[in-house]
Amino acid sequence: MAQRDTIPQRFKKTTQRYPQYNIVSSKDENGDFQPITYEDFYTMVKTLGTAFLDKGYTRGQHIGIIADNRKEWLQTDLAALSVGLVDVPRGSDSTADEIGYILAHAECPLAFAENAAQANKIFSKIADLPGLKEVVLFDPAPAGDLKVPEGLTLSTLDDLMKQGEKALKKIPDRFEEELEKGEGDELASLLYTSGTTGTPKGVMLTHHSFGFQIDRIQDHVALMPGQVLLSVLPIWHSFERAVTYICVGIGLTLAYSKPVGAVLIPDMAKVRPHWLTSVPRIWEGVRAAIFRKMEKASKTVHRIFTLSVLVGETHAYFLNMLTGRIPHFHKRNVVLDTAISILPVILLYPFRGLANLLVFKKIRKTLGGRFIAGISGGGALPDYVDHFFQAAGILLLEGYGLTETAPVLAVRKQKHPVTGTVGPLLKDIDHRVLNAEGAVLPPGKKGVLYVKSEQIMQGYYKQPEETEKVLKDGWLNTGDIAVFTTTGEIKILGREKDTIVLMGGENIEPVPIEDKLCESPYIDQVMVVGQDKKFLGALIVPNMELVEQYAQEQNIPYVDRAALTENPTIQELFHDEIQKKISPQNGFKPFERIFRFALLPAPFEVGEELTHTLKIRRAVVDKKHKKIIASLFV
């Protein structure tokens, strides 16, 4: 990539190529999607960028953006980057403490807030923000709802746009001059990790970090100008940021929705997207909703559905075996795979066609009619979810990355997706898998993954000691336990720091166990525990709707949900579910069995026990439920 090649420079080139294509489509007050062309949006970005210059903000300064997905976020982001500012974003579900810490640590003189609620969070921390001089609201300023601290200026985005329009008449060329000054190795963003442990760290990512992926992603996924991508993940998060810049760099349309079934599914019908990027939990939710709907259907419909899923998943498995889309950690025996798989593929084909006609075609129709694939990232895609969507003929491409790599490192190839893996690394990424002694391991052997490429962060802002822990000589320790196939795909087995070591010395990766347990319709969330103990235990968040339904069927009286979870019959139900899932028949070793469990009355919540990408903050759960965990091992 050229040295002078920033995200805004790419945006400008896309605008010149496809001026009348839509860059963004967002909802108006009536819930209707309103598109904006690249040409019109470029004018909006230019106007706001000129306002930044007119107000005296200079290259390299940091600005906060506290807001969720909306066109104003993208406008502000591109305008800031165009004139050399560095954005520091966070979502509106962040706490006042988080926002205060981030804006103070990043030394932001300016912060954008989505609305009065976000502005008030900032105002509540103003004593810790001596460098903050101005707050700008995306929404119009509400009368009487805001008490602006002394010494702080409050304005709206509309105010800045008016200032930019006037300034453009005085300095018409200044914006373009600043945009062209930008260089690829300049800092573009400070992304503060929502990490599973510790204080957020400011990951320093350059324009080059994000641009690296734009140049290489199409070797894996055939994104085309004019296509529509439904955006549901937090736009400030590294995965969605990368997706946004990839779309802007290629010429796609971003349509903003919400990761809630009641909103997402109707929006799919309205927008008819080609692509959807999401975290695994969204796909789990879609699958669970389909299964719940079928359970309420007539016995005949339910049986047809169940049989169709079985046929579809079995056919997909043997088809994957025949076409080399099952991961091989030792050299593949093509003759044997063909001999085993070809007859089942042929025999099941007509039944697969019938299942498609009766069931799967209707499911695919809900995705809008021109859906190509979903791209899942931000965590491991459970096998049972992957298998179901394969059965339904809906392509899911699992990807992998870290905030520190901006983030995309790997993604399954659209033309040859190897199930159970996150695909091969992007081109020009060096890698090595190391064991505990630091020896490089061959394919088929699991160890900690290290990567080296031009996309890797500059480091953690103002935290050189933390940077040194993970980044040495250009090699980033991902902290993930991985194993490569013989054909170059990666399977991620879990986090090194999440490994549970039992008293007997057995090393256990909790994620595969947790994923398997979540296949039970009665289990919504789970965390396996047992560090330095004789056996494993589990904290389980039940699906209380189904548990109550079961209680009614069994004529179990109860006062409230908390009492219901203590009922012996309900406890026996979960014991049986656990024993069925975590068994030798499902590939689990004896020391991976769950011997004791506790049912939690309240779900894990984002910002507390969960990160913004729905990963478990194990340290938080350990602390919050310390007594319950201890009771499992008495």
Image: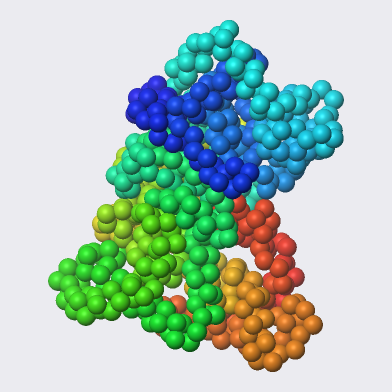
Residue at 35% across / 38% down in the picture?
225
500 over 54 or under it: above or below: below
Q: Judge left or right: residue 115 versus residue 422.
A: right
Q: Nearer the viewer, residue 280 or 380?
A: 280
Q: Is residue 295 above or below residue 616?
A: below
| Residue at x-position 60% and y-position 68% | 525
The mark total stands at 0
In the image, 348: left or right of 526?
Answer: left
Residue sitting farthest toward the top:
170
Pick the front one: 557 or 28: 28
Q: Could you say where residue 426 lies in the image, as x and y percent from the top left?
A: 34, 45
Residue 56 rendering spot, x and y as whole percentages: 64, 14
Q: Quadrant of residue 570?
A: bottom right
Task: Name, please, the residue furthest toward the bottom.
Answer: 555
Between 149 and 24, the residue placed more toward the observer is 24
Of residues 454 and 31, the one nearer the viewer is 31
User: Which residue lies at the image location 57% right of the left edge and 44% below the top edge?
Assistant: 27
